[in-house]
Image (tube, rainbow, N blue to C red):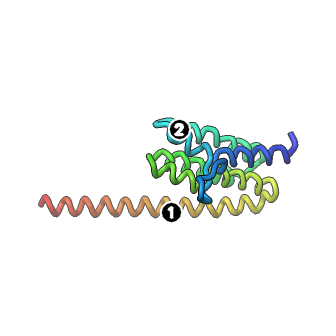
């Protein structure tokens, strides 16, 4: 298959999933991903399953683990946050994981080294933020236990 065909297919799928429609009298665009997400229980998982296409394509193109991780995190955020009623659909409209992943795939084809280094940076930033959230939650938990202990005794 020709690389240009793959780029077009990748962009077309991203447009269909994330940008196909416009809310009248606004510049807000959305695709079928948030619409599929309206199906209770499985909608966001179906959208995530379709988005796996980008993960597979990055793997086929020889993307390093950091690039695969970045694409996977985009999909994971889309599925997990997208699963929250109402807020998830709003997130889907603005996050546009498939557009992001189509751009990563295109960048990987054009400049693999730069895409890999940017992805490593992005992965480290997400990891640092996750660690910060875990520490904050642990501190909150310890504080709540201390307050509960003071209340009881």
Between 130 and 104, the one nearer to me in the picture:
104
Whether residue 14 sits left or right of residue 9 in the image: it is left
Q: Position of residue 26 (x, y in %)?
A: 59, 59
Q: Position of residue 114 (x, y in %)?
A: 76, 62
Between 57 and 82, the one nearer to me in the picture:
82
Please tell me how crowded label 2 is: few (under 14), some (14-19), or many (20+) other residues with Cα within 10 Å.
Answer: some
Query: Which residue is at 57% across, 63% downward?
Result: 125
Q: Name the secondary structure under disc 2.
A: helix
Q: Determine which residue is flagged by label 2.
A: 43
Q: Name the secondary structure under disc 1.
A: helix
Whether residue 150 sits left or right of residue 46 in the image: it is left
Q: Determine which residue is flagged by label 1.
A: 129
Between 100 and 37, the one nearer to me in the picture:
37
Whether residue 46 sits left or right of residue 113 in the image: it is left
Q: Earlier in the sequence, mark 1 or mark 2?
A: 2
- Viewer-nearest of labels 1 and 2? 2
Image height of 105 relative to 37, above or below? below
Q: Position of residue 149 (x, y in %)?
A: 18, 60
Task: Spot the residue most to the right.
Answer: 2
Image height of 12 relative to 133, above or below? above
Q: Where is residue 86 in the image (x, y as percent from the top left)?
A: 45, 49
Residue 69 showing in the rendered view: no
Please tell me how crowded label 1 is: few (under 14), some (14-19), or many (20+) other residues with Cα within 10 Å.
Answer: few
């Amino acid at each position: 298959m020709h690389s240009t065909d793959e780029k077009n297919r990748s962009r077309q799928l991203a447009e269909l999933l994330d940008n196909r429609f416009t809310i009248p009298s606004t510049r807000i665009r959305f695709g079928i991903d948030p619409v599929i997400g309206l199906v209770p229980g499985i909608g966001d998982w179906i959208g995530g399953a379709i988005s796996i296409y980008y993960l597979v394509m990055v793997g086929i193109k020889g993307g390093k683990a950091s690039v695969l991780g970045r694409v996977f995190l985009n999909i994971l955020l889309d599925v997990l946050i997208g699963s929250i009623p109402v807020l998830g659909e709003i997130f889907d409209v603005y996050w546009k994981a498939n557009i992001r992943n189509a751009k990563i795939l295109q960048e990987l084809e054009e400049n693999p080294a730069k895409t890999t280094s940017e992805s490593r940076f992005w992965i480290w930033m997400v990891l640092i933020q996750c660690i910060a959230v875990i520490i904050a939650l642990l501190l909150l938990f310890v504080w709540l236990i201390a307050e509960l202990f003071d209340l009881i005794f």
